[in-house]
Image (cartoon, coloured by chain):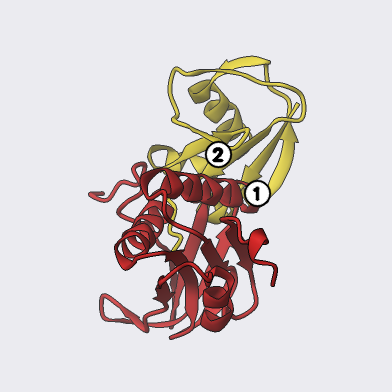
Amino acid sequence: MDESEDVPKDFIKLKSAKLSVDEVSELVVSPNCGAVSLFIGTTRNNFEGKKVIHLEYEAYTSMAETEIKKICRDVRQKWPSVKHIAVHHRLGVVPITEASVIIAVSSPHRAESLEAVMYCINTLKASVPIWKKEIYEDEYSWKENKECFWANSEK
Amino acid sequence: QVSVLYFARSAELAGLRSETLSVPRQITSLQLWEEIVKAHPRLAVIRDQVVFAVRQEYVLLGDQLLILQPGDEVAIIPPISGG
């Protein structure tokens, strides 16, 4: 790999195939970075005593990618030493324990990438137009993130 | 004429994912909602939980005046749950 091409990059992907932690971490690895921080969102098998069979995700894809790009831009403003950022989100059916989202960030030292990963997932939950449906044994439910400012959580 | 996109619960209530709608070039976001509910009355139940995305920018339902161009995308955005 030509080291002069190692400019900071954002890797954003929304896809229905199974996500790979190896693939996402390899995207952000960089010779002058000593830290790669990762977040993996996995599907839980229960919610309020109900058994979750699987999750289904849908997205306003073009806007979701734009919003994730905005998050990457904000990350680079807040933590200028961040090198590469990768956000992969799965769409369609996600079986229990499989990953629905993987976020990886590289930086020279660990503090920035750890903080940037947390910022990415928190902001994604507040602003990216992606929806999750939880499928139970005999019903389903469209979930609402508490970070979403237009959800009525106290209804 | 704008493209209206429906997602998640709003797609279930409206029974479709997208359509073109004829609306005035200048309209408040609340008036736009009311036009859409006229076409799909079952959407009325989620009025307090949705926002719009007009040309991919979030807009609350209210007095905000929208200047719409032909072919603009307007999406109904129920509460999000990504991540």
Instruction: Give the colour of chain B.
Output: yellow
Q: Quadrant of the N terminus of chain A?
A: bottom right
Q: Is residue B40 above or below residue B22?
A: below
Label 1 sits on a secondary structure element that is: helix
State the image coordinates of residue A144 (x, y, percent, origin top left). Answer: 37, 57
Q: Residues within 10 Å of mark 2 (few under 14, many from 20)?
A: few
Label 2 sits on a secondary structure element that is: helix
Tell which chain the image draws in red. Answer: A
> What subunit carries mark 1?
A
Identity of the residue furthest to the left in this view: A154
Q: Is residue B3 visible?
A: yes
- For the residue marked with disc 2, what is the amino acid? Pro
Image point (58%, 61%), residue name: A58
Q: Which residue position holds label 2?
A: B41
- Displayed quadrant of residue A50: bottom left
Q: Which residue position holds label 1?
A: A62
Image point (52%, 61%), residue name: A84
Q: Is residue A127 visible?
A: no
Image point (67%, 51%), residue name: B16
Same chain, labels 2 and 1 = no
Q: Is residue A94 above or below residue A123?
A: below
Q: Are marks 2 and 1 in contact (CB under 8 Å)?
A: no
Q: Nearer the viewer, residue A154 or A67?
A: A67
State the image coordinates of residue B3 (x, y, percent, origin top left). Answer: 72, 36
